Image: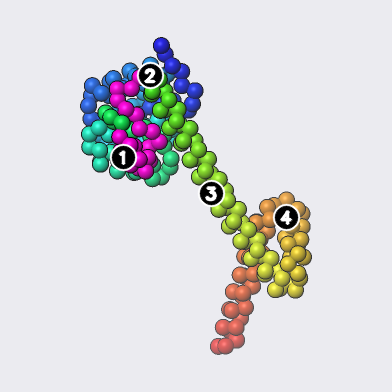
Amino acid sequence: MEHQADLVPIKVCILSAEAGLRQRLALDCAAAGYQVDQEFSEDQQLVEFITASDGDHIVLIDVQHQREERLQLMKRLSAKRPLAIVALTAEADASLGARAVQAGAQVLLVSPASADDICAAFSVAAHQQAKHLWLESEINYLRDKLAERKLIEKAKGLLMDSARVSEAEAFRLIQKQSQDKRAPMVDIAKLIISASEMVKEASRSRAAQNAT
């Protein structure tokens, strides 16, 4: 019975040094409703493919052999961005499973695996990848908002010093400029900071000239 995967990415990359295992895994993945995009026998081939690829793949990595090398490989692959990685082993091993997750895998799949097992493992891996990507996006958003807030606070301080206004009045001035120019408040803040730095530089140049 053919299973239909309900999550993206549905393309799969398989890494195993054993040709027979790669072929069997490709057939099992197809039975689970997943398209095998590439098969690799060497780690570097997979690294180069994932690095050059624009799309997302579920990465099925055989860790039955060269276990330490494959764990290091998963760390390399997931260092830049979250990937949907499934580690394949010959037996259930809680210790290996924990190490695989720490290295970047989401699931430990025990071979031989049925189409149901593969579908479940791939679904979990894809869900976890999507969750990690969302969390990274939220972190980046909050980091950007914090940076913007710091710029606005700095611009407010400059207005308070130069125009002798209160903090609330300085905020309203930036807000009004933002509305009048239809520009984000952070852009107005950057203009205020830039203008203040130009004034300071001009003052330093004048002072240097007077000193000579």
Gap between marks 2 and 1 measured at Cα: 25 Å
Asked whether 134 falls inside the magenta stretch, the response is: no
Among the 4 quarters of the image, the one containing residue 30: top left
**Between disc 1 and disc 4, whose residue precedes?**
1
195 vs 123: above or below:
below
Crowd tier of the residue under label 3, counting other residues whose Cα lies within 10 Å: few below 14, some 14–19, many 20 or above: few
Crowd tier of the residue under label 1, counting other residues whose Cα lies within 10 Å: few below 14, some 14–19, many 20 or above: few
Q: Which residue is mark 4?
A: 178
Gap between marks 4 and 2 measured at Cα: 57 Å
Gap between marks 1 and 3 measured at Cα: 33 Å
Q: Disc number at residue 115?
A: 2
Q: Position of residue 79 (x, y in %)?
A: 38, 45
Q: Please identify, in this view, whether the residue under mark 1 or under mark 4 is nearer the observer.
A: 1
Crowd tier of the residue under label 2, counting other residues whose Cα lies within 10 Å: few below 14, some 14–19, many 20 or above: many
Please, what secondary structure does the residue beneath circle 3 have?
A: helix
Q: Disc number at residue 140?
A: 3
Q: Residue furthest bottom?
A: 212
Please, what secondary structure does the residue beneath circle 2 have?
A: helix
**Between disc 2 and disc 1, whose residue precedes?**
1
Asked whether 112 falls inside the magenta stretch, the response is: yes
Amino acid, disc 4: Ser
- Closest to the observer: 47 or 201? 47
Q: Are marks 1 and 4 in contact (CB under 8 Å)?
A: no
Q: Please identify, in this view, whether the residue under mark 2 or under mark 1 is nearer the observer.
A: 1
